[in-house]
Image (cartoon, helix red, strand yellow):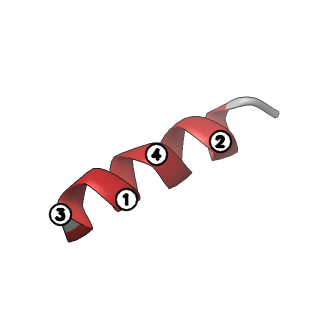
Amino acid sequence: MKDHQDENENKTHNLT
């Protein structure tokens, strides 16, 4: 579950 959150944050960071 924690791994999934990390991926979500990575996508948000890639938004820039």
How much space separates mark 1 and mark 4, taking CA atoms? 5 Å
Query: Residue at 37% across / 59% down in the picture?
Result: 6
Label 4 crowding class (10 Å Cα cut-off): few <14, some 14-19, many 20+? few
Disc number placed over residue 12 in the picture, else none: 2
Q: Compared with residue 10, is residue 16 higher up or lower down, i.e. above or below? A: above
Write down the quadrant of residue 15 in the picture. top right
The reply to whether callout 1 and callout 3 are in contact (CB within 8 Å) is yes
Which is closer to the viewer, label 1 or label 2? Answer: 1
Q: Amino acid at mark 4?
A: Asn
The reply to whether callout 1 and callout 4 are in contact (CB within 8 Å) is yes
Q: Residue furthest right?
A: 16
> Which residue was labeled with disc 1?
5
> Which residue was labeled with disc 3?
1
Task: Please give left or right for residue 9 compared with residue 13 in the image.
Answer: left
Mark 3 residue element: loop
Disc number placed over residue 8 in the picture, else none: 4
Residue 9, image x, y percentages: 53, 53
Label 2 crowding class (10 Å Cα cut-off): few <14, some 14-19, many 20+? few
Residue 8, image x, y percentages: 46, 45
Q: Amino acid at mark 2?
A: Thr
For the N terminus, give its image quadrant: bottom left
Q: Residue furthest top?
A: 15
Mark 2 or mark 3, which has the lower sequence index? 3
The reply to whether callout 4 and callout 2 are in contact (CB within 8 Å) is yes
Label 1 crowding class (10 Å Cα cut-off): few <14, some 14-19, many 20+? few
